[in-house]
Amino acid sequence: MPSRRTTPLNPPTIESHECTTGVRLDKLSLVPFFQDAGETALQRINSLCSARHFKSDESIYQQEELAAYIRIVVFGAVRLLHHTEDGKDILIDLLQPGEYFGTLPVLGDDRYTESACAHTDCCLLTVDEKSFITILYEYPDIAVKLIGINAKRLKKARETIRQLTSSPAEQRIASILLALAEKFGEQKKNGTLIQLPLSRKNLADSTGTSTETASRIMSKFQDKKIINTGRKWVSISDKELLRQVLEG
Amino acid sequence: MPSRRTTPLNPPTIESHECTTGVRLDKLSLVPFFQDAGETALQRINSLCSARHFKSDESIYQQEELAAYIRIVVFGAVRLLHHTEDGKDILIDLLQPGEYFGTLPVLGDDRYTESACAHTDCCLLTVDEKSFITILYEYPDIAVKLIGINAKRLKKARETIRQLTSSPAEQRIASILLALAEKFGEQKKNGTLIQLPLSRKNLADSTGTSTETASRIMSKFQDKKIINTGRKWVSISDKELLRQVLEG
DNA sequence: CGACGCTTTGAAGGCCCTCAAATCAGGTGG
DNA sequence: CCACCTGATTTGAGGGCCTTCAAAGCGTCG
């Protein structure tokens, strides 16, 4: 263990990404709800989207703004936050390429109920309401897929509720670390590095605890050699032990 | 205040409900996602559904069973519960006529992730996967509606998460009482009666607290003349005061 | 190198859970 | 119709987890 730890994060930069039509079609085909669409369909869909880049920490939209677009992550990561009245932020989700976010009046929300922010440099596809409806009517398969995706998200949200009401903070943090490792992890010699800047406050916000408690728990995990962590980064050395913490 | 309180609940009985084709069409047209469907569409949809009655507390399906049907509440109330490994139940939702529940493999779940139970005597419409897909492909409007409904549910779940992490039990209970009054309430001389058997355990399960805490808080509300309550029933005397509790 | 901001650690206190026991409403059977 | 029984509700006491408030340690970036 080096006495002076420096960040091991090595995120790909936005410069390495080019939004050519070929890349866009390629990325589109990876999006879960476009997955089974054919070549022609993808080209049609592509013609209905536009792409845009965001710098790390740049705001994509703010809670309460008029809902105007559905967006799809093509590259990088996006952070969804809910601002509460008493000034706290709740981290709702971290999204990776292929996931969608945002809403539209036709989906029942006139305004965004959360803020979206570029967690790293990222590239997003943007679909407006008219195009979105066009796509759904032309390709019913996609509508069914979308319903399934929302059902999964609801399931996950309910799982979170269950955990919040029945598990202590230690288990909730173990749970989110495993989930993030699954989603953003990268195998290294020393374990699975979570390729995301992840502060104690981020962790606290997403597990419903305080920064201090999150810090204490992370320190405890590090003492037990379960994880290796520094400022804004985490690497999991012993996934098995972490799973045992989760079980209790 | 009578020294001996008896239940003021007066739920309509299942006998008062007849599932004739006329009634079914009528009820179908009230279901949010069939709302804008025309007469012909409703008849087509009706031919793809079957109806069934359940007695109060009768099991509709159990968590982990194979997902086979989407169901729609036509009459009465349905309770959705999640059983946790450590033997606790979480009350996920109480459904009223017009709401749907259940899932299907095509929606991404092979098995039910919760149990459904008749909260009162009730009548349900049942749709199997084949019919469901048929409906979605024939009427894309309905698919879009469904996506919107799921988005709303997700929003509500996230709101619950927010509350669980940032509000004390007292505010969470105030919140659910107001929500239930909105959904199932009936105006009486003494206030809004929540027309549902609602035990302290039900309340505790849905707010993520213990039966005892729920009881203490309800007693406190009663002392403050905010509510009037007995065994398994609640009536709200002063909605305004309750809203103030919610604000903090 | 220095300052700022993230992280760690300590201490005090509050909220809520658990365990236990008493009270009470409603249903049952005589 | 009444006494009894069962299960829901209430209330109390003790203790643990986690929050808040403070202050000291360290990376990072200019």
Image: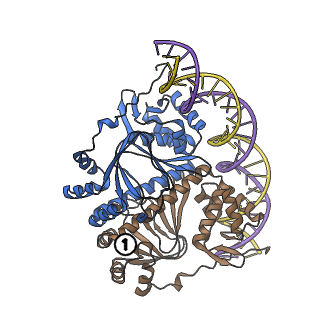
Chain colours: A brown, B blue, C yellow, D purple
Q: Is residue B245 above or below residue D21?
A: above
Secondary structure at badge 1 equals strand
x then y, percent, for residue B174: 49, 40
How far from the left and from the top, in percent, is residue B239?
43, 35
Q: Residue at x 45, y 53 (%)?
A: B156
The chain that hosts pointer 1 is A
Q: Considering only vertical position in the picture, is B79 above or below B226?
A: below
At horizontal 80% and vertical 73% (from top left) the residue drawn is A3
Q: Where is residue D30, by image quadrant? A: bottom right
In front here: C4 or B87?
B87
- Residue identifier under label 1: A127
Q: Quadrant of residue A205?
A: bottom right
Q: Position of residue A186 (x, y in %)?
A: 63, 76
Image quarter of the N terminus of chain A = bottom right
The residue at 59%/40% (across/down) is: B210
Residue B33 vs residue D18: left or right?
left
Q: Nearer the viewer, residue A135 or B59?
A: B59
Return the x and y of residue A232 as percentages of the image width and height.
Answer: 65, 69
Q: Is residue A225 visible?
A: yes
Determine whether, in the image, residue A123 is placed left or right of residue B23.
right
